[in-house]
Amino acid sequence: MANKIQLSKRREFDITVNGDTYAGVHAMPYVTAALRSPDTVAKGYVRILDGLTKSAVINNIASSNPIVAAACSFSSGNDTSTSEQVLTLTDLKVNEEICRGTIFPTWMGQGMDRNGDLPQSFSDFLLQVIAGKAAAQLEIGIWQGAAPFGTGFLSDDGTQDEAGADASACKDFSEVDFADALAASDILTDMAAVYDKAASDISGILTKPGVGFYMNNKTYGFYIQALASAGSNQGQISGLGFDAKADTATYFGYPIYRCPGMFNDTILFTYPENLVFGTNLATDWTEARLIPTYEYDGSDNVRVVMNFAVGVQTAVATDGVYGSTVWDS
């Protein structure tokens, strides 16, 4: 039979449940959870493109000074140009196996019958755990790249060096070289350098919706320490601020986005619509299966299989600043 699943506010599709597909109505949301749960994605710090099969072309039109002096003839300023960025998906999978014999003696094995089906509660728990681990791994992959993820926003090989950064999705951002590793004592200076670079090189992004600073939790901690040591009035320092109730911080009104998957000693300045995360959710190419192999091969094992694809790209290649210790001075 077919079960209709609401994956998002925008899309729904049918899943056919057959003998080797784990309760389709339950299985597909776990793929969605794996792709939607990385902090960067879940908190809306990137633009999401679903429904891709292999790649997507992101088109842009730029025009800075289209106004010219009036005349009888057509006199274009030739100031409008087009550009495109290509986002390519990388096929990924989850292949995990667990032995029922290790579960029976534990509290999770309560209600299990060696001759019966797996309890729904255990199946749900198993998929939740694996989807959660996949999401945590994906959070690192979309930023740092490397196998099996492909190109990330900050590197293409998982290495924090100039070669990786030069091949990253953000390779065309303006560069700011941090002379030393970031610390609470100089984080305000380094953030000012990133902001100043944006103001001088790409001032147009300063008014883009949501434009702000991207950093990992360690770097964010340095900023909060700097507020605590340098300011008063609960962290409000001449336009710098921390809202303890919301657990959010700003820098002269610009939000600070905490992304655990980012490298240390790295700060980006851009906006969420410019960081694009593509998936093949809502296509026929995603799947999630819980396979009771103990029924077929004489083992005591259960396998979890997920297949999906993801990729990242910037929408406007130059709309951002990439501050790091990897750049040559």
Image (tube, rainbow, N blue to C red):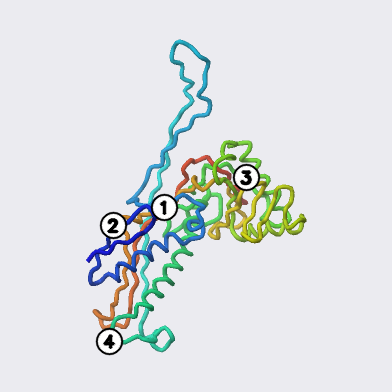
If you read the primary sequence from the N terminus, does the residue marked by circle 3 or circle 4 appear first?
Answer: 4
Q: Residues within 10 Å of mark 1 (few under 14, many from 20)?
A: many
- Residue 311: image tag: 1
Q: Amino acid at mark 2?
A: Asp
Quadrant placement of the N terminus: bottom left
Which mark is nearer the camera, 3 or 1? 1
For residue 212, above or below residue 145? above
Name the secondary structure under disc 2: loop
Residue shown at 54% from the left, 46% from the top: 271
Q: State the separation of the CA atoms marked 4 and 1.
A: 42 Å
* Residues tagged 2 and 4 counted as in contact (Cβ below 8 A): no
Q: Which residue is mark 4?
A: 115
Q: Amino acid at mark 1?
A: Gly
Residue 272 in the image, given as x and y percentages of width and height: 51, 48
Residue shown at 53% from the left, 49% from the top: 165
For residue 320, above or below residue 126? above
Q: Amino acid at mark 3?
A: Val
Q: Which residue is mark 3?
A: 176
Q: Which residue is mark 2?
A: 284
Foreground residue among 24 and 295: 24
Quadrant placement of the C terminus: top right
Q: Quadrant of residue 288?
A: bottom left
Is any part of residue 125 visible from this angle? yes
If you read the primary sequence from the N terminus, does the residue marked by circle 2 or circle 4 appear first?
Answer: 4
